[in-house]
Image (cartoon, rainbow, N blue to C red):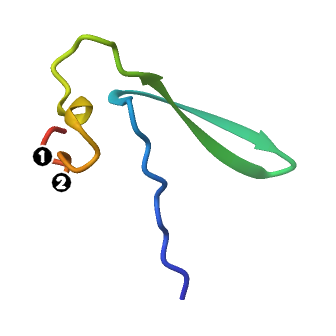
Protein backbone atom coordinates (compact mmCIF):
# COMPACT_ATOMS: atom_id res chain seq x y z
CA UNK A 1 0.00 0.00 0.00
CA UNK A 2 2.06 2.89 -1.28
CA UNK A 3 0.53 6.32 -0.99
CA UNK A 4 1.50 8.81 -3.65
CA UNK A 5 2.98 11.95 -2.20
CA UNK A 6 3.19 14.72 -4.75
CA UNK A 7 6.22 16.96 -4.39
CA UNK A 8 5.38 20.54 -3.50
CA UNK A 9 6.48 22.92 -6.21
CA UNK A 10 7.00 26.54 -5.24
CA UNK A 11 6.91 29.54 -7.57
CA UNK A 12 5.21 27.47 -10.27
CA UNK A 13 2.26 28.56 -12.38
CA UNK A 14 0.07 25.46 -12.26
CA UNK A 15 -2.27 26.80 -14.94
CA UNK A 16 0.54 26.60 -17.51
CA UNK A 17 0.91 22.82 -17.38
CA UNK A 18 1.99 21.15 -20.59
CA UNK A 19 1.89 17.37 -20.71
CA UNK A 20 4.02 15.30 -23.06
CA UNK A 21 3.81 11.54 -23.42
CA UNK A 22 7.04 9.71 -24.24
CA UNK A 23 6.93 6.02 -25.12
CA UNK A 24 10.04 3.83 -25.09
CA UNK A 25 9.86 0.03 -25.36
CA UNK A 26 6.09 -0.04 -24.71
CA UNK A 27 6.51 2.06 -21.55
CA UNK A 28 4.77 5.42 -21.62
CA UNK A 29 5.89 8.19 -19.30
CA UNK A 30 3.89 11.40 -19.05
CA UNK A 31 6.01 14.47 -18.43
CA UNK A 32 4.24 17.52 -17.02
CA UNK A 33 6.07 20.78 -17.60
CA UNK A 34 5.22 23.91 -15.62
CA UNK A 35 6.31 27.46 -16.28
CA UNK A 36 7.76 29.50 -13.40
CA UNK A 37 5.56 32.16 -11.87
CA UNK A 38 6.02 35.68 -13.10
CA UNK A 39 7.62 38.13 -10.71
CA UNK A 40 5.51 41.05 -9.61
CA UNK A 41 2.21 39.20 -9.80
CA UNK A 42 -0.08 39.17 -6.80
CA UNK A 43 1.22 36.03 -5.16
CA UNK A 44 0.87 35.68 -1.42
CA UNK A 45 3.80 33.28 -1.16
CA UNK A 46 6.29 36.14 -0.91
CA UNK A 47 4.93 37.31 2.43
CA UNK A 48 6.81 34.69 4.42
CA UNK A 49 7.16 30.95 4.90
CA UNK A 50 4.23 30.71 7.31
CA UNK A 51 1.74 32.80 5.37
CA UNK A 52 0.66 30.02 3.02
CA UNK A 53 -1.17 27.75 5.44
CA UNK A 54 -3.33 26.38 2.65
CA UNK A 55 -3.80 26.31 -1.09
CA UNK A 56 -6.53 28.91 -1.15
CA UNK A 57 -4.65 30.98 -3.74
CA UNK A 58 -4.96 28.40 -6.50
In the rendered image, residue 37, in percent from the top left (x then y), is placed at 36, 21
Left-right relation of 12 to 49: right
4 to the left or right of 13: right
Q: Is residue 40 above or below residue 54?
A: above
Q: From this viewpoint, which residue is outermost toward the left?
A: 56
Q: Are marks 2 and 1 in contact (CB under 8 Å)?
A: yes
> Residue 24 occupies which quadrant of the picture?
top right
Compared across the picture, whether 50 is left or right of 19 comes to: left
Give the quadrant of residue 12. top left
Which residue ends up furthest to the bottom in the rendered image? Answer: 1
Q: Is residue 3 above or below residue 23?
A: below
What kind of element bears circle 1? loop
Check disc 1 and report the residue beneath it. Answer: 56
Location of the C terminus by quadrant is top left
Image quadrant holding the N terminus, namely: bottom right
In the drawing, what numbered circle is on residue 54? Answer: 2
Q: Label 2's element?
A: loop
Q: Residue at x 20, y 47 (%)?
A: 52
x and y percentages locating residue 16 in the rendered image: 37, 24
Specify the farthest residue to the right: 25
Amino acid sequence: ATTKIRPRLKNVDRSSAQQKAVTVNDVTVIITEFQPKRRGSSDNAANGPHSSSGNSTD
